[in-house]
Image (cartoon, grey):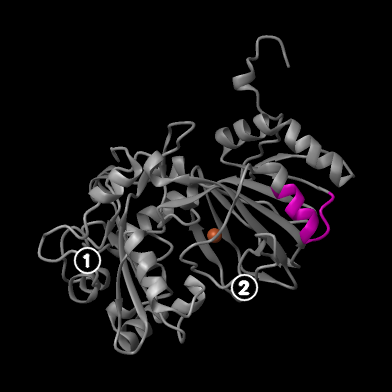
Amino acid sequence: MAEGVSPVDEVLDCAVEPGHPAGFTPGLKDLRETCDWLRDNAGQVRRTLHRHGALYLHGLPVRDVDDFARVRDAVVGERACYREQATPRSHFGDEVYSSTDLPPSQSIRPHNENSYTLSFPGVLVFGCLVAPDSGGATPVTDVRSVLSGIPEPLARRFRETGWGLVRNYADHLGLGWRTAFGTEDRAVVSGYCEENLVAHEWCADGHLRTVQRRSAVIRHPSTEEEAWFNHVVFWSEWALDPDVREVFLDDLGPENLPFNTAFGDGEPLSAEDVEAMDEAYRAATVRETWKPGDVMVVDNILAAHARESFRGPRKILVAMGDEVSLSDCSPTVPPLAGFVTAAAGTAAGRAAANHAAGGAAQDGKPGRSSRGWLRSRGRSSG
Ligand SMILES: [Fe+2]
């Protein structure tokens, strides 16, 4: 350790180039040595993540899923798994997944994994086995910068109301509820929703609709910094290609979009709101071109991740760990099944007002009380 540097400040001596995530090359050819190095330097790795949000490790001797699983186990204390799945992905065993099985032509906007659940992974680990011919990076975005880049009135409104999410789980469009929840049993899904503050309704055609309110801004439990932590832009109707949005709205109706987001009181977002948030993401996004053996570690609260479209074969693995409870992150509003007030004029609002069941808010009354959530976790949400 250099003289005058306290252990608490010690971080890896990373390369920090504009436009790229912080990078480091351990330079160890042997997997066992690499895992030992990761364990021996766990504190530095974690502090580097806290400073930069993500750490790109170049050229690790990772050649298959087993190698990757060993690296993951050297990086995270405890493994975490997916809940309320949102994207098709392959499970390779050992809690190692494909990053997504969505078609190569589709890019994915930045998001924090599982920002809509009551607990979520604190750390994500990505690894490259096969690099695409072009594109296909996993860009990362420092969401502390996103929060400071969002116009103040808009950020304030989200702090005061949270964000709302309406999902429709239909087999013919996106993920059906059986895949997303990993069960054939409706009662299991209903039980999950009731336990996890998700308002839900079984629709006449057999699909599932859910509504939940969450905090759009949370505080990192270790660094105590505030971060923009949500899927507001990614799942907004305004993030759809305009032609696709029009077809969806005409064919499905606004309440049946696979995903839509709103302010936490159910009021609709405007295209301009989404553009302002999108701009804040763009300004804070960095990317690296994958090479086989590269591994990227992401602090899931401090950094969002995305996917570029790509050409050629691509095999990027992902695994998660070190679960964090929302109740430890000072949410600005407590989580809620449904919205606080029913709103008209927005797909999300209409869905909440007209369709969401199981305690979704109606007529200005709160949805199923968050007090139970607070009680069960034994602390105020702030
Ligand atoms: Fe993701």
Q: Quadrant of residue 5?
A: top right
* Residue projecting furthest to the left: 363
As shown in the figure, which amino acid type bears the numbered disc 1? Answer: Ala
Q: Which one is nearer the viewer's eye here, 347 or 309?
A: 347
> Which residue range is magenta in the image?
61-72
Report if residue 215 is visible in the image. Answer: yes
- Element at label 1: loop
- Residue type indicated by callout 2: Asp
Q: Main secondary structure of the magenta part?
A: helix
Q: Nearer the viewer, residue 180 or 62?
A: 180
**In the figure, residue 213 lies in which quadrant?**
bottom left
Instruction: Point out residue 89 in the picture as x, y percentages from the top left corner.
Output: 60, 70
Residue name at image x 27 percent, y 46 percent: 333
Give the residue number, with chain letter if any, for mark 2.
101
Q: Disc 1 designates what residue?
A: 360
Q: Residues within 10 Å of mark 2 (few under 14, many from 20)?
A: few
Residue 331 among magenta residues: no
Spot occupied by residue 100 in the image (x, y as percentages of width and height): 60, 68
